[in-house]
Image: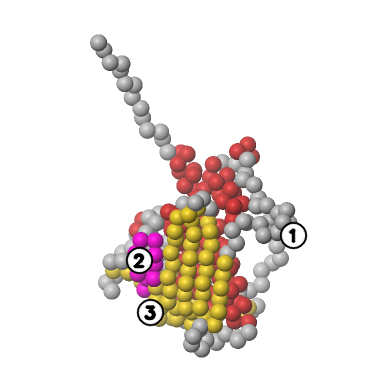
Amino acid sequence: MRRMPVHASRFVPAPAHTWALVACLLCATAGHAAAEPPAPASPPAPNPSQPGLRPAPPVPASSGLSSQERAAADCRAALTSHPLRITLSPGESSGAYALHLEFFAPVPVRVAWQAMTDYDAMASYMPDMQRSVVQAVDGDTLRVLQQGSSGVGPLRVSVRTLLDVTLHGHVASWVTVSGDLDTSGQARAEARDGGSVVRYTALLRPRMWLPPLLGPWFLRRQIQRQMTALREHMCVLLGQAAQTARAAPASPTRDVPAPTR
């Protein structure tokens, strides 16, 4: 694979390619992050499956928020009625896990894809991820290096993974080149009424030891935390797009003279 300089504009905001699942799973192999400070008490999020509970309403236009803040807030409110669907089961080989994940995001598919390909920003919002960089590009194949640190209490483990990602439209397939996590899988984003559906399927095999009983629980919880962060980033990008559209100057118009007789 030839190496060549990679510019941010190659990936952001162009909604062309991704493999966000590996980005989200990189740090999961070492278990859950160190204990976080308790969050302040808040009312439980609405669950549409329970009678009498409804999703949070959109933010009213008179709330005083900017168009960017209002679009992002409406997006977050809509997420409460669209939970993540995660299935993590033992794989066919020892120590492997099969993952199936799906979620809906109330954003256009171009925004969902932009979030999934926002490599430069990924380490800034993804829990436990410290570095994410595209090292080389060869046609439709990217070589991506990701690093992170995760653990339980004072025990933390650094994780490094190098992957080749093949891109085609809104579908990406990946395989591990080297590192601490053997993984292969596919990610895709599809336009749906009112937003986008994102799906991941993958086979994971950590190269380090995981507790037989706690390992799957750690993996599932970390995946949920990081996918929640990904959907939140989609809402942020939606707000930015709304602000950009509002700030764009209107196309100039010209008066057309009335026809003369």
Q: Residue at x 59, y 56 (%)?
A: 79
Q: Amino acid at mark 2?
A: Leu
Q: Is residue 247 above or below residue 95?
A: above
Q: Within the image, what quadrant is residue 152 found in?
A: bottom right
Q: Is residue 196 above or below residue 258?
A: below
Q: Amino acid at mark 3?
A: Val
Q: Quadrant of the N terminus?
A: bottom left
The residue carrying pointer 2 sits among few (fewer than 14), some (14 to 19) or many (20 or more) residues within 10 Å by Cα, namely many
The residue carrying pointer 1 sits among few (fewer than 14), some (14 to 19) or many (20 or more) residues within 10 Å by Cα, namely few
Q: How is the image coloured?
A: secondary structure
User: Can residue 250 be seen from the camera position used here?
Assistant: yes
Which numbered marker is on residue 41? 1
Where disc 2 sits, the SS reads: strand
Q: Is residue 181 above or below residue 133?
A: below
Q: Residue tagged by mark 2?
A: 167
Instruction: Measure the C-alpha gap from mark 1 to mark 3.
Output: 44 Å
First reached walking from the N terminus: tag 1 or tag 3: 1
Q: Amino acid at mark 1?
A: Ala
Q: Is residue 190 magenta?
A: no
User: Can residue 125 be seen from the camera position used here?
Assistant: no
Which numbered marker is on residue 177? 3
As rendered, which of 167 and 6 lies closer to the eye? 167
The answer to whether 151 appears left or right of 50 in the picture is left
Where disc 1 sits, the SS reads: loop
Image: magenta residue range:
161-173
Prevailing secondary structure of the magenta residues: strand
The residue carrying pointer 3 sits among few (fewer than 14), some (14 to 19) or many (20 or more) residues within 10 Å by Cα, namely some
Measuring from the top left, give residue 71's x and y in whole percent.
55, 46
First reached walking from the N terminus: tag 1 or tag 2: 1
As rendered, which of 80 and 251 lies closer to the eye? 80
As rendered, which of 248 and 15 lies closer to the eye? 15
